[in-house]
Amino acid sequence: MEKIGIMGGTFDPIHFGHLSLAEAVRCELDLDKIIFIPAGEPPHKEAENLGSTEDRYNMTLLGCRDNPFFEVSRIELDREGLSYSVDTVRALKELYPEGTEFYFILGADSLMDLEKWREPKLLLSLCSFAAVARPGFKNKKTEAQIKKLEEKFNADIKYIESSKLDISSTDIRRRIAAGKSVKYNVPETVIKYIEEKELYGFKPEFYPEVRGFKKKLKLELKPSRYIHTLGVADEAVRLAEKHGEDKHKAYIAGLLHDCAKNFDRERTFKFCDEYGVSLDKILREQPDLIHSFLGAAAAEREYGVKDRDVLNAICYHTTGRPGMSPLEEIVYIADMTEPNRTHYEGLDKIRELSYYNLKEAVSEALNQTINFNKEKGRIVHPLSIEAFEYYKKYLREEII
Ligand code: ATP
Ligand code: MG
């Protein structure tokens, strides 16, 4: 007959405390598998700052993915109303053949609370229990509680030694909200999920490399340019969010798009030479455009950016080019529409378009830029003209 561990919890988020506890119990009791059961609406937890049920479920799946003995059940999530362990155990017992042995796994803190749970006597009679220590709970106290419950309810509770990891979801949520690292407390895949969905108050500016980038940019850029840069990074994230693109990349590209903007003349020419940015006739006549191409090279060499898409977004943020990637389009637009930009005619139109159709926004922005430069008697970079032709055609064909 199968021996199955039941690992209930809020998993908000799942962390290595949960995972190592489950693994210790599995090995110690020789269990066939452990079922992780994220709580639906936990009856004894304050409701604020909880991740959504779907997020907790997804994170639990990610956390359990690389252990073939772990599975995740939606049994409590799909049940209406409050979920009580006693109902869950009863429901599970109906799903499995008679004689299947169940072990309900608990940390010491939960064990101390158990008498306050719904129908503790019935719950303790339904299956065996496996309890593990947790930092802050003395082994002796835990053992005494086990003894008490065994005597009072005739329960079967096994005490399992496991490494006491001082990790809790509460602490993890606090750390994330404060921009601190939770690496080595939470599986990498779960961290990625939290960052991507910005759970628990995570903001892209918390990415570890961002702090270094900002420090350097603050030294390199004029104050107003630095403020514009932060605005572009934030606006790029908003657009990435709206259009389902990678917010991390959008933030980094936005942050670095003007990293070469305030290089002086000497440095500009020296680095163009060093980094292999060729200064053609147009760039010589329009030195304002150099910073985009040079910026991409500087982002790669001086900031260590390797992602091609991010580098291209920096490279083409002033001229645009035909067939830009969504990230390139986002940075191109964010540069024009970020909230600190002084207002100009046509800005609102681009901004409005950008929230529902990036390509239309790009087409409009290119059109305005080309006309503006022509009016000023400046030469227009051929990439911008090609880009405008491309987007016009693209939108025409899409309509047909
Ligand atoms: P929160 O801080 O939000 O209460 P948590 O870290 O306590 O979260 P839960 O989802 O409440 O996590 O815990 C599920 C189960 O795992 C409980 O039985 C709890 O006692 C146990 N547990 C959680 N973290 C640890 C840990 N570090 N060591 C041992 N047991 C743990
Ligand atoms: Mg807890």
Image (tube, rainbow, N blue to C red):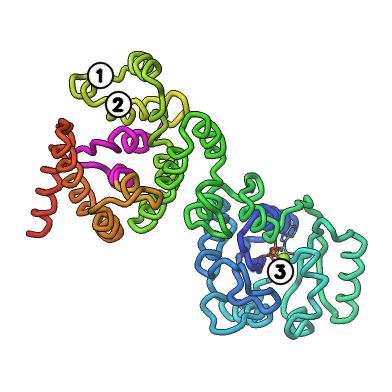
Question: Within the magenta stretch, is there residue 321?
Answer: yes
Q: Name the outermost residue toward the front.
A: 376
Query: What numbered label is drawn on residue 290?
Result: 2
The N terminus lies in which quarter of the figure? bottom right
State the residue position of label 1.
279
Label 2 to label 1: alpha-carbon separation: 8 Å
Q: Secondary structure at mark 1?
A: loop
Q: Identify the element where label 2 is drawn.
A: helix
Please name the residue shown 64% across and 76% down the image: 42
Q: Quadrant of ligand 1?
A: bottom right
**Contact, mark 1 vs mark 3 (Cβ under 8 Å):** no
What residue type is disc 3 on? Tyr
Q: Nearest the camera: 49 or 284?
A: 284
Residue type, mark 2 in image = Ile
Badge 3 local density, few (<14 within 10 Å), some, or many (20+)?
Answer: many
**In the rendered structure, which amino acid carries the disc numbered 1?**
Leu
Tell me the quarter of the picture where residue 98 sits. bottom right
- Quarter holding the C terminus is bottom left
Q: Is mark 1 within 8 Å of ligand 1?
A: no
Residue numbers of the magenta segment: 306-332
**Lower sequence index among marks 2 and 3:** 3
Q: Is residue 156 above or below residue 62?
A: below
* Residue 30 appears in view: no
State the CA–CA distance, disc 2 to disc 3.
67 Å
Residue placed under numbered mark 3 in the picture: 103
What numbered label is drawn on residue 81? none
